[in-house]
Image (tube, helix red, strand yellow):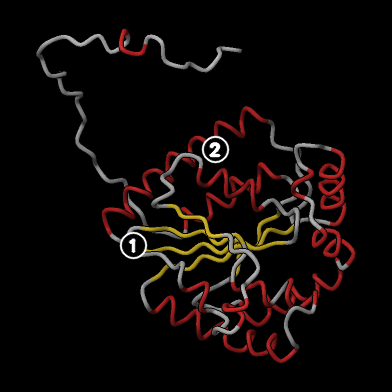
Amino acid sequence: MAADKAKFERKPYEKELKKLQTELCFLQDWLKATGERVIVVLEGRDAAGKGGTIKALTARVSPRVFRVVALPAPSDREKSQMYIQRYVEHFPAGGELVIFDRSWYNRAGVEHVMGFCTPEQHENFLELCPPVEKFIVDGGIRLIKIWLEVGQEEQEKRFRARIEDPLRQWKLSPMDLESYKRWFAFSKARDLMLERTDSKHAPWHIVDSNDKKRARLNVISHILSRIPYKKIQREKVKLPARKEGKRYDDQASLKGRRFVEQRY
């Protein structure tokens, strides 16, 4: 990873984030106008910063255009299906960008390391993934794969913060603790995944996520750089005049209704 830099201060971070989020709004208009389809695969270790990055990505855009998919553990029915099947169901239609908060790459990472799949299933996934992704790309979907890379010390710091902060304790799961114990097993799984699935048609790009603010900005900037969007000119909107007619006292009609107590 790159040499250590000073942490990004809040004000310059928010200034840069606003610029990038404005560009995401332009991208949104372009997606709707062109009917383009985009998938963003966001992967990384536990506590790598995926959740905060996704919030920064989606804060100023429509959830109907920028859809986030974070699937739970598969049901018994889904376990009986073709592995990729439950992910394909959530692929974008025209004018949509879908962000997978963890994706089919679960099989290359947590499922493999935790023993939730067999060695044969793991190998089969690594072998079939590149041609399947070529099929996706050849079908006209833009596929962007990003790995958030966090260091051991920073991950431990974030886990300890989750343990001590009541506002973050919900983020800490038994699986997080297992992943913490199996750091080097996950490192080996990551390296094998990158080696076998980093292709010309669907390359991996790694983002240093030890500084969450820098990581968020770098992820958004990278996504924007991978899509040839253009600013769509909009007609200037003018508010229409309200219809004339008999005046209606819409405040008096609320008298006697239950209002929430104004505690603030």
Instruction: Point out the residue furthest to the front here.
Output: 256
Give x and y (percent) for residue 77. Answer: 57, 79
The amino acid type found where label 2 is placed reads Leu
Q: Which disc is residue 36 wearing?
A: 1
Assign a secondary structure to mark 1: loop
Question: Neighbour class for label 2 at 10 Å: few (<14), some, many (≥20)?
Answer: many
Instruction: Report, in whole angstroms, how far the alpha carbon at label 2 lies from the one at label 1.
Output: 24 Å
Query: Is 115 positioned to the left or the right of 108 in the image?
Result: right
What residue sits 50% from the left and 83% below the top?
Answer: 132
Q: Which disc is residue 75 wearing?
A: none
Q: Which residue is mark 2?
A: 17
What residue sits 16% from the left and 9% below the top?
Answer: 247
Give x and y (percent) for residue 209. Answer: 71, 52
Query: Is 164 positioned to the left or the right of 145 in the image?
Result: right
What residue sits 80% from the left and 59% below the top?
Answer: 176
Query: Where is the C terminus found, in terms of image quarters?
Result: top right
Assign a secondary structure to mark 2: helix
Residue 86 or residue 38, whichever sits in front? 86
The amino acid type found where label 1 is placed reads Glu
Give x and y (percent) for residue 180. Answer: 86, 61
Q: Could you tell which of marks 2 and 1 lies nearer the N-terminus?
A: 2
Query: Where is the N terminus found, in terms of image quarters?
Result: bottom right
Give x and y (percent) for residue 200. Answer: 52, 78
